Image (cartoon, rainbow, N blue to C red):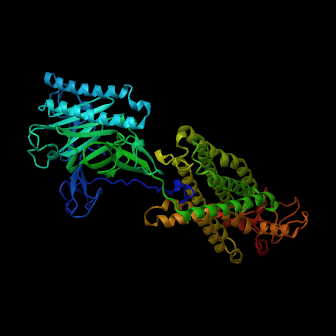
Amino acid sequence: MQGPSLLPGLCFLLSLSEVMARMTKAATCPQCPQHAFCVHGTYCTCDSGYASDSGKKFFTFPLETCNDIDECKPPISIYCGLNAACQNVEGSFHCHCNPGYKLLSGDTQFENSNENTCQKTTSSKTTRDTEELQRVVEKFESLVTNDTPWAMGEKREVASWATTLLQTVESSVLETALKSPEQKNQKIHNSTVAIETLVVTDNCSEEGKVFSLNTYMNSVDIRCNDIVQENVKGPTAIAFISYSSLGNIINATFFEEANGKDRVYLNSQVVSAAIGPERNTSLPKSVILSFQHVKMKPSSGKAVCVYWKSTNEGGQWSSDGCFLIQANKSHTICNSTHLSSFAVLMALTNQEEDPVLVVITYVGLGLSLLCLLLAALTFLLCKAIQNTSTSLHLQLSICLFLAHLLFLTAIDQTKIKLLCAIIAGALHYLYLASFTWMLLDGLHLFLTARNLTVVNYSSVTRFMKWLMFPVGYGVPALIVAISAASRPSLYGTRVRCWLDLNQGFIWSFLGPVCVIICVNLIFFILILWILKRKLSSLNTELSTIHNVRMLTLKAMAQLFILGCTWCLGLLQVGPAARVMAYLFTIINSLQGVFIFLVYCLLSQQVRKWFREIMKSKPESETYTLSTRFGANSRPSEGTGSIQAAGSVVGPSVLVHRLAESSVEGREVLIPKSRGALE
């Protein structure tokens, strides 16, 4: 079970995107660095095609610099279309046709894939070179599609077969590239493999030159000096190969360094980088490899850079000599001190549970379950308080009781996927229903407060009775039905039976909850304003007796304890995240305790009912405070009350006594005498 909070979805911080408009340079602008201009006469921002060292869009630091953005590499990776490649230039980029292809217009470059008209040239030499690479590709496809050991499932044989296959393809590609050194750069690809080769014949005339090879949105950056082999006379070559389906064969099960508690899967294509004619694997300087993810990186995922290591058992994935540089949702960048076949593994790590928070959650929810059960029984059996407000509190208590009980007993029942999805759907519905009943409670209190002078409880009661059950149970059912119909696979995760946080699915819960909290807050403010206006018309003595300020203080306390505390989940970021997690867990796990305290123990009618039960008085004894009277009776001094019509998100205590002169089903004027309010 996850201990940090009752509902993991509330731990996400809501944010608004910042929008700023560009301004032209002004005379008062501070000194901006090269490739930057001034905004609002105050800040500097880099020109299009450049980015600041700090990563900030707007800056004032005088030593900040703007560097060129390589649009041809991840995470941008401009796509130029078939038989074309992206070329980065200072502050911009352009596309050009691959060797052996040219534009129909005769131009040497173009802007984007829409302008791509690259056609194969008619050179017979180029055609022969391409055909040889094509034969290598076809040979690889035949090896994969034929009856190979991987189809038989023997892990050791699969590893040996994969090692042989990778070495064979690398050698064949390098041999083909070196046969035609005048064809410095060759590219070919189909649905299963993509190959790019580069031949170096000038012994790296440009010092520090770096070559970049790209296949299938993967790339490798290697220094020219690392390609040239000093003990070899003649040209040298580098081959970069991406396999689109090989990762399904040599998958994450061949990674033996994984933590048994983590779920690991291959999240990139398998790529190979090799230099020849001599197969040197170690390099004086590391190469940079960029991988495009097969799936978007999840928030709990950890990228691991690995290479295919030949062993006595055939081969396996290993992280030795491979290091992670950077990883975002779509790409991972690694470096390696040797050449081999590489891939990116994604390890889904479990967040470590805080044992103290786990204990707090169990103890707090256990107490809440007991108090919610007692509160529900009180609302059902205590005749003196049974009215519309009590019905709202009863339904709220039932929904919270079932939600907390299911949370405690089944949140971590993830072994059976279908069962876990059903549990997640039930939790989604029960917690949404709880918040919906809070909204109805706030609406009922607002309608009651609006009619303080002449309380038309007849119309309010009829309206609420007609509205509350279809809305209280129907609206959450509709939301859950739409969510389940649109994204059924996102109910239940690997670690808990709750909503999946990917693809924004959590907003099917967070969205309605945030709306309800905001609406109830508006109700609370309106009720405070109504009470202030109405009570100011009463004489000073009555206002003093009623102690309006004390009632307001109680209402504010209840708003903090039972409503705004859900917002603490949004504050679990930064240095205060741990403190907020403790506050959120403690206060919200005790929600049932506070409901029983406010609506039962602090009610005069309920306390009187408890005392009568303890004294075992006969049932015929008439309660002093009653919610209904006979046709010819009227409220007596010190009597006549309804149960506090409050909302769990705040204002219930506010009219706990102001509404004590109401009679359900009647219109009753608020008494103007001192005794009627005491």
Q: Position of residue 374 (x, y in %)?
A: 74, 61
Q: Nearer the viewer, residue 644 or 154?
A: 154
Q: Quadrant of the N terminus?
A: bottom right
Q: Nearer the viewer, residue 216 or 648?
A: 216
Residue 252, relative to residue 7: is it above or below?
above
Q: Position of residue 222 (x, y in %)?
A: 20, 45
Q: Position of residue 30 (x, y in %)?
A: 21, 63
Left or right? Give the position of 651 relative to 2.
right
Residue 537: quarter of image: bottom right
Name the residue at 36% across, 44% down. 317
Q: Nearer the viewer, residue 618 or 367?
A: 367
Name the residue at 27% across, 49% down. 335
Name the residue at 39% across, 38% down. 156
Residue farthest toward the front in the current orientation of the protein: 312
Residue 574, relative to residue 195: is it above or below?
below
Q: Position of residue 17 (x, y in %)?
A: 39, 53
Left or right? Give the position of 92 relative to 494.
left
Name the residue at 13% across, 43% down. 229
Residue 539, relative to residue 44: is it above or below?
below
